Image: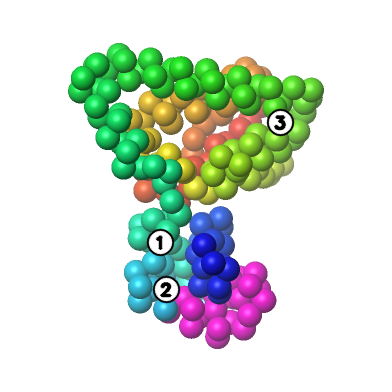
Amino acid sequence: MKKNPTDKILMFLKMRGEATSLIIADELAITKEGARKHLLSLSAEGLVKATVKSSGVGRPSTFYFLTENGMARFPDTHADVTVQLLRSVKNVLGENALNLLISDRESVVYERYEKALTGTKTLDQKLKILSQKRSEEGYMAEWKKDNDTYFLIENHCPICAAATECQGFCRSELNNFRELLGPEYRIERTEYIIDNGKRCTYKIEKV
């Protein structure tokens, strides 16, 4: 993706989820009018939509977010081939064979992450490395902390087509996160891309 202003806006909205024209202007170091012009162009192409929100104080603000077509600008790795293969496995070999494949992938991914987390002691350290590994794999991951609550946020899903076809992949990833962080933490998914969410967000709290 070329780094022209409109592509930068698409990338920013992908990472941020939604933002006002002022926030976008500050991020891109352009004027608010310039940001609005680009947003109108993207809206005309069907790549972004706007929604008005009120904070209860002052005038309502207009927030922009990616449409399904906007999301499609970020590639889903080998999506068509993957979905076809999953359907073939299920049709030819059965549901159990598909579950075995997902379990095998879960084990391979777990071992890779476990190795990367070797030597880490704190949750901050674990989430920093885990988000880095996930970003390397195309998930555009980041982590945040709000008092005693942590969030692992994945702004993109490079296997979205496969996960939509077979949600066992999503259960598998949640299982791995729970195993990697340990029983002292409760992890739940609070946002879900394939359930019309803008991203996948995992809420992490100490038990």
Mark 3 residue element: helix
Q: Earlier in the sequence, mark 3 or mark 1?
A: 1
Instruction: Please tell me which residue is depicted at 58% across the width and 68% down the height of the picture.
Output: 3
Residue 170 numbered mark, or none: none
Q: Horizontally, is 150 left or right of 105 in the view? A: right
Residue matched to label 1: 70
Q: Is residue 117 above or below residue 199?
A: above
Q: Give the residues in magenta.
A: 19-40
Q: Is residue 159 above or below residue 19?
A: above
Task: Judge whether residue 131 can be spotted in this image.
Answer: no
- Specify the color scheme: rainbow
Tag 3: amino acid:
Lys
Q: Earlier in the sequence, mark 2 or mark 1?
A: 2
Q: Horizontally, is 107 left or right of 170 in the view? A: right
Tag 2: amino acid:
Leu
Residue matched to label 2: 42
**Mark 2 touching mark 1, by CB under 8 A?**
yes
Instruction: Please tell me which residue is depicted at 57% across the width and 47% down the height of the picture.
Output: 140
Give the x, y percent position of residue 33.
Answer: 55, 85
Mark toward the viewer: 3 or 1: 1
Task: Tell me the distance, in whole angstroms, between the alpha carbons under discs 2 and 1.
Answer: 9 Å
Residue matched to label 3: 126
Quadrant of the drawing holding the C terminus:
top right
Mark 3 residue crowding within 10 angstroms, few (<14) / some (14–19) / many (20+): many
Residue 31 in the magenta stretch? The answer is yes
Give the x, y percent position of residue 198.
Answer: 45, 51
Give the x, y percent position of residue 80.
Answer: 31, 42
Tag 1: amino acid:
Gly
Task: Tell me the distance, in whole angstroms, between the alpha carbons under discs 3 and 1.
Answer: 32 Å
In this view, the residue in front, 120 or 205, is 120
Name which quarter of the figure residue 163 lies in: top left
Residue lying furthest bottom: 33
